[in-house]
Image (tube, rainbow, N blue to C red):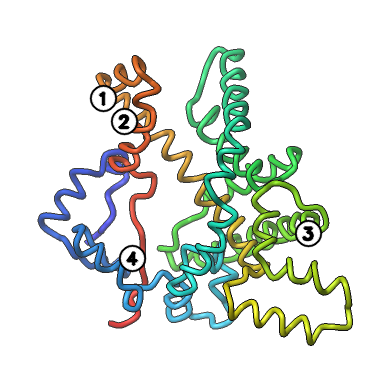
Amino acid sequence: MNIFPSPTQRLDPFDFYSMMRKKHPIEYDEENDMYGIFRYNDISKCFTDFKNFSSDFAKWFNSTIDNSSTKFQDTSPIGPSLITSDPPKHRKLRNSISEAFNPKQIDILEPKIEKITHDLLENVIQNKSMGLIQDLAYPLPVMIIAELLGIPNQDRHIFKRWADQITSLSILTNKNSQDEVFENNYKLKKEMNSYFTSIIDIKKRDPKNDLISELIKSSILNINNNDDQNDANKEGELTQKQQQKKKDSFVLSQEDILSFCNLLLLAGHITTVNLIGNIFLSLFENPNQFNLLQSMPSDYIKPTVEETLRYRSPVQFLSRVVTNA
């Protein structure tokens, strides 16, 4: 049985979800070789039992892909990251990233976010027409993520191209197309990592008030900056310091920073585009609520966003890997 809503149901999948909760709360999908779970309590148990239901998809990938030379980290645009790790690494990784990626950073960006939004809307006014997704929802998060990471303005077109490629990537359900998808993913990740590595090298020498610079402060790269440059002959001593710091607290590696940059571009972009589109779709379907929002925007903007996240989530399913059958 197909555990996903059909293409005609995807904009309004709630009747499908209701039917599955009542009649097929746990169902096996032969075509995709996975189980669908639809009731809250069952889902909650899976998400809190990381020993049996893991976020580490390398475990699934390495056990199901025939080509033993093909690695998960080479075939995912993100690779090992915050969303593909289990405790205790997940907790330590999240804590380290949270030190840099915090509300204060977002507050600093607020005036720039407003300006970017006003500029996009000004273009719409001048053109006298608007495509919500094309003119606002799609470019806005790419521009903000670039600003957050500290990417030069002239490179924003590269971010947009990557977002286009990531958005068009196929879901791995057709085994005949796997090799092509793997190759495309590998090329994309290699290009992204090469670019972000060059940005990291620049910010190691000249840190700014941006997310990548803050992540470097919590990384092994910062130890290299402070110690290795003072005495290139102290590699043994440097290694001891690195090992000691790893024992005391989790230290981000360069791979961790690269994965987070890729993750932010992927997850931050796609989910924000979907959220903006879903807000307006839901408001158009509920004109009384739309009128209420328009009459008192300062009172209802935040509840509108929160209710859309609950009612029509930008992410419609999450996956886990069964480690103990």
Residue position marked by numbered label 4 in the rendering: 32
Q: Amino acid at mark 2?
A: Ser
Q: How many marks?
A: 4
| Amino acid at circle 4 | Asn
> Percent x, y for residue 5?
27, 50
Residue name at image x 23 percent, y 68 percent: 28
Q: Which mark is residue 286?
A: 1
- Disc 3 on helix, strand or loop? helix
The single residue placed furthest to the bottom in the displayed view is 236
Q: Earlier in the sequence, mark 3 or mark 1?
A: 3
Residue type (three-letter) at the residue carrying disc 1: Asn
Q: CA distance from mark 3 to mark 1?
A: 50 Å
Specify which label sits upstream in the sequence, 3 or 2.
3
**Image-quadrant location for residue 57:** bottom left
Q: Which residue has dot 3 on it?
A: 204
Dots 1 and 2: beta carbons under 8 Å? yes
Front residue of this view, candidates 142 and 247: 247
Dot 3 or dot 4, earlier in sequence:
4
Residue closest to the eye, 212 or 230: 230
Tell me the residue that label 2 is attached to. Answer: 282
For the residue labelled by badge 1, is the local secondary structure a helix, a strand or a loop? loop
Q: Is residue 184 above or below residue 296?
A: below
> Disc 2 and disc 4: Cα gap in Å?
30 Å
Which secondary structure lies at badge 4? loop
Q: Is residue 221 left or right of residue 64?
A: right
Q: Tell me the residue at 25%/58% (across/down).
A: 3
Tag 3: residue type? Answer: Lys
Q: CA distance from mark 1 to mark 4?
A: 35 Å
| Mark 3 or 2, closer to the camera | 3
Query: Disc 3 or disc 1, which is closer to the eye?
Result: 3
